[in-house]
Image: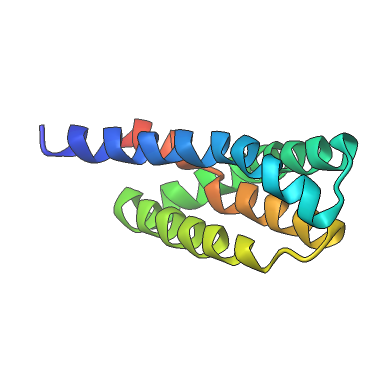
Amino acid sequence: MRLIPFLVLCYFFAYIDRINIGFAALGMNKEFGFSPIVFSTGAGIFFFGYFLFEVPSNMALEKVGARRWIARIMISWGIVSMLMVLISGTSSFYIMRFLLGIAEAGFFQAFSCT
């Protein structure tokens, strides 16, 4: 019972993080001059990084343990989310979205193992 509120809160933040890019599009497209193709590619690159690092993340989860791995996911996810403020163009947008996918990889599996 102690774990359920934490899990609900984490999934809530994950949902907000994933839909937040749509709200950011309103200002980012104007400010950086992103076309719809550039923006949608950047939004999709997140899932490419997530997909590539899902299995290695789950393997590390098994070796390190759920407590430490969940902490790693949350800390790196928070750091990369904060670094999104440093985006200055198309390439930095792509890189940060890919890094965010890597940081969040293993998130679902880590909580289903606990």
Residue 89 lies in quadrant: bottom right
> Farthest left residue?
1
Residue 92 horizontal side relative to residue 97, left or right: right
* Residue depicted at 46% across the width and 59% down the height: 78
* Residue depicted at 40% across the width and 41% down the height: 13
Q: How many marks?
A: 0
* Residue depicted at 50% across the width and 65% down the height: 79
Q: Assign the N terminus to one quadrant of the image.
A: top left
Residue 58 horizontal side relative to residue 92, left or right: left
Where residue 94 appears, as percent x and y from the top left, is 79, 53
Where residue 64 appears, as percent x and y from the top left, is 40, 57
Residue 4 horizontal side relative to residue 60, left or right: left
Where residue 4 appears, as percent x and y from the top left, is 20, 32
Looking at the image, which is closer to me, 68 or 13? 13
Which scheme is used to colour this image of the protein? rainbow
Indicate whether 26 appears above or below 8.
below
Residue 13 horizontal side relative to residue 97, left or right: left
Q: Assign the C terminus to one quadrant of the image.
A: top left
Where residue 57 appears, as percent x and y from the top left, is 55, 48
Indicate whether 64 appears above or below 107.
below
